[in-house]
Image (tube, helix red, strand yellow):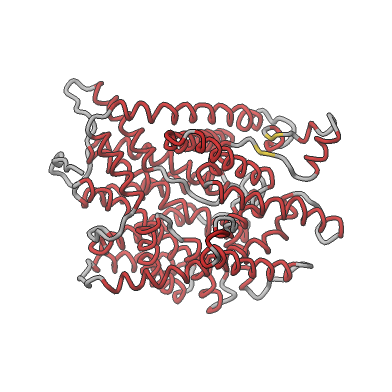
Amino acid sequence: MPNEPDVGEGLTPSARALVLGALLGALFGLSNLYVALRLGWSSGVVVTAALLGAAGLSWAARLQRNGRPPTRAELAALAAMTSAAGYSTGINLATAVAAWAMIDGRHLPTMVLVGWTALVALLGVAIAWSMRWRFVDDASLNFPSARATAEVLARLGDGATELAKSSLRPLLVAFACAGIWEAATGVIPRLWAAHGSVIAARSLPSPTWSSWHPAVAWLVDHGFVIELSAVALAGGALAGRRAAASVAGGTLACWTVLIPMLAACGVIASTDYNVAIGWALWFAVPLLVVASLVDMAAAVRPAARSVAKGQQRHPRLVGLAALAVLLWAVAAVEVPVGLAIAGIAAAFALALVCTRIAGETDVVPTGACGKLVQLGVGVAQPQALFGNLMATSIATGAAASCADATTDLRCAALLGLPLHRQAVAQVIGVLVGAATVVPAFVLLVDPAEIGTTLWPAPAAQAWRAVALSLSSGWQPAAGVPTAMVVGAVLGVLLPLAARRGPKSVRRWVPSAPAVALGVLFPPAMGWAFAFGGFAAAAWQARHRDHGPAIAFVCAGAIAGESIIAMLGRIIESAP
């Protein structure tokens, strides 16, 4: 890949890249927060940010008399800022922070939460910078996302306007369609205080159609309803056919078969999601935790072996130590000192493991890491609910931020760009994300709504359930111990069958985390997720040459719904 001469001698990216990167970082930070609270995962925005950045900087250049087209350096910095603002700061909010809000019934103070979120993410960036000799300079690690992003940035930076236009067109069309649909079926009805729930107004078939025909009533009564949500449909399309089928299996087994049976027997009071999820999550969480630990056990050995092979160099520990002490000082205000120190120590170890795995597989296993740390902390101090969640958030948040920052640094290295400028862009992105996403979370997300159909928050529900189960005051309801045992057994069998089973059956083994998500999702969202995955697979089978178009359409649809929905919540909250 040809190198490009660096533009400018300053430490920071250009002013126009900083301004546009901050704007896109704030928008995509809100988008990722929405997606994480709805689906339980964060979507990648690097390529999307690069495309939008190329279009925005080109437009800005045309407005200037002697404006120059965007360079690779500017686009790489802009993409790094956007990614750091959304991915590095949102993961804690949708997991530990949301889980504590569910337990305590209120949010942490906004400024404390802003500082906490920024410091955890900055710790990950510092670890990535100090360990760049291992992960950035080592050519044996592929980092698929970094390589793909570098290819796109190289072509955009070479003035490939046709590529930007052809890629942006489906993205912007999907953005507009999803945004208009969300405004018409979600934002406007809420602002006008329309009767009925938002889900009822945007599902197929709608519960209001039950009187039309007995068959429609049967479908609605048994949970066969698809939520017409762009986020759910696009999420399934991006996840793939296996994940979609696994989510469908979890939704079918739980919400169509098991929950109605339990309601008929009087074990639970109602089949309503907001009531039944309190029972269903105790099957999903052991399945998710045990499967994550099995996968983690399989990945730790090669990761440790690879790290041991590298020649140890002296990293810049001064900045890391200072940041670790600062983070400990904030954590010590509310978290027991021992747990805060344990969380910081675990952050270094898990950052190495997660980044090593991401370099090979493009998957950041923060879910598995989080469950491992949470279990360890819970055994050490079972009654420290808040300490359990926040100490774990240090480790997983820093590990996720490290993996994201390392991907950005590797992308810059592939393009021959200065790494220090990329690191500065990441730091700025983290600060922008913490300053915008955290206040939006506190203002727009009511703790009483977390875990409901409005904000299902599957990841937060899992974190909350593990913390409660490790505390001494948890009292399981009828049938819960049996559900936990069954979920744990499946959590062992499914990953082992997928890894060690006969080759002819491995492709048919369900994904354990996806099955758990099918249980944690509201049934209408689960069916929408599955439908999106099946539809995308069918389209790709007939149009193999247009595979990337699906990714652009899905990215635009997710951004359109999430940004309009969050803007709608801001309008609702205005005095």
Please indicate whether residue 270 sits to the left or right of residue 37 in the image: right
* In the image, residue 309 above or below residue 287: below
Q: Nearer the viewer, residue 186 or 161?
A: 161
Q: Nearer the viewer, residue 77 or 47?
A: 47
- Image-quadrant location for residue 504: bottom right
* In the image, residue 393 above or below residue 69: below
Please indicate whether residue 9 sits to the left or right of residue 469 in the image: left
Please give the name of the residue rendered at 53% of the width and 45% of the height, measured from the top-left corner: 35
Q: Is residue 312 visible?
A: yes
Please indicate whether residue 201 sits to the left or right of residue 464 in the image: right
Please indicate whether residue 474 sits to the left or right of residue 108 in the image: right
Q: Nearer the viewer, residue 171 or 572?
A: 171
Q: Is residue 402 visible?
A: no
Q: Nearer the viewer, residue 306 or 106?
A: 306
* In the image, residue 18 above or below residue 404: above
Farthest residue toward the bottom?
A: 380
Q: Quadrant of the N terminus?
A: top left
Please give the name of the residue rendered at 41% of the width and 64% of the height, measured from the top-left corner: 330
- Residue 74, given in percent of the width and then of the height, sits at 24, 39
Please give the name of the residue rendered at 43% of the width and 53% of the height, measured from the top-left corner: 114
- Residue 72, given in percent of the width and then of the height, sits at 23, 39
- Residue 321, given in percent of the width and then of the height, sits at 29, 69
- Residue 570, given in percent of the width and then of the height, sits at 54, 36
Q: Quadrant of the C terminus?
A: top right
How many marks the image carries: the answer is: 0
- Image-quadrant location for residue 574: top right
* In the image, residue 57 above or below residue 391: above
